[in-house]
Image (cartoon, helix red, strand yellow):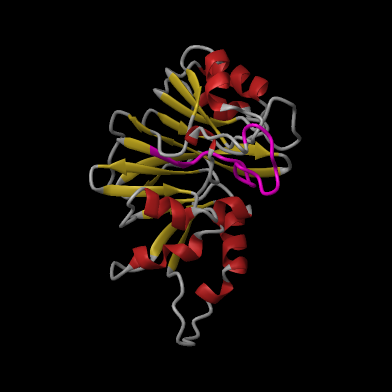
Amino acid sequence: MQLTFLGTGTSMGVPIIGCSCDVCTSTDPHNKRLRTSALLSVGDRRLLIDAGPDFRAQALANHITRLDAVLTTHSHYDHVGGLDDLRPLIGQEGNMPIYAYASTLRDIRERFSYAFSGIDDGSTRPLLELHEIQPYQPFCAGRITILPFNVQHGTWTITGFRMGRLGYITDASAMPPVSREVLHGLDVLVLNALRFMDHPTHFSLEQALALVEELQPQRTFLVHLTHAFDHAPTNRELPDGVQLAYDGLTVELPEPSRCA
């Protein structure tokens, strides 16, 4: 199994429009962060985790030519704004399966209402097939077994995913005990760490590292990063086994359980 980080930035990306700070003007390519998204490859299967507004650029940069499904953590624009850009990847294989909680699917149906209108106006539209998932109930996508679990994002309950020995969490501000229980024994944990200072809807670096210390994954990659983090200096200060992810980074993992 291979995990590719398509984007590792927060909702505004890095550089931020109009900002002239050292990170936003840095020449280090590791400090260029598109909105957070990832591609999971298992054999010939490809699963996208979140289709944000940078998806077109991410797909071109990473030579994505097909997808089997999209796992959606929640409906904030930086995680769903690129759903329309799925159009050329749907092709003749039918609708694109989108897996998410009911609340996320409701928002997708509302925001992309033209995709579900049933009216042929001559324009192309993303052919999306919405699949509701339930927390802590495994489901099959792209012949891969996936366990969704609850994550608190401020007042929102959003979705984290476990696939084999990989745990994927973005936009967390808190983790309920039952979710922490399903995240032990990981080879790789992907976890958000917005900035150094506390934030009402996202983990700070200190809070993220506290969760890492509790869960003890073999490796942790931090995502959903603001311009607070200068890549190389920050990585030198992080504990062993923890590092900032960067756009284009690829990580190898054991293959997860397959399903029908």
Residue 5 inside the magenta-drawn segment: yes
Q: Is 25 above or below relative to 77?
A: above
Choose between 247 and 208: the one closer to the eye. 247
Task: Determine the residue positioned at 73% across, 42% down.
Answer: 155
- Percent coordinates x, y for residue 113 in the rendering: 58, 73
Magenta segment, principal secondary structure?
Answer: loop
Q: Is 28 above or below relative to 104?
A: above
- Percent coordinates x, y for residue 15 in the rendering: 61, 42
On the question of residue 132 being in view, the answer is no
- Residue farthest along the left direction in this orientation: 43
Region rendered in magenta: 4-23
Task: Determine the residue positioned at 34% across, 55% down.
Answer: 67
Choose between 170 and 59: the one closer to the eye. 59
Choose between 219 and 255: the one closer to the eye. 219
- Residue farthest along the bottom direction in this orientation: 121
Counting every numbered tag in the picture gives: 0
- Percent coordinates x, y for residue 254 in the rendering: 29, 28
Quarter that holds the N terminus: top left
Q: Quadrant of residue 77?
A: bottom right
Q: Quadrant of residue 211?
A: top right
Q: Is 156 above or below relative to 184?
A: below
Q: Quadrant of residue 224?
A: top right
Choose between 47 and 81: the one closer to the eye. 81
- Percent coordinates x, y for residue 172 in the rendering: 63, 35
On the question of residue 185 being in view, the answer is yes
Residue 136 inside the magenta-drawn segment: no
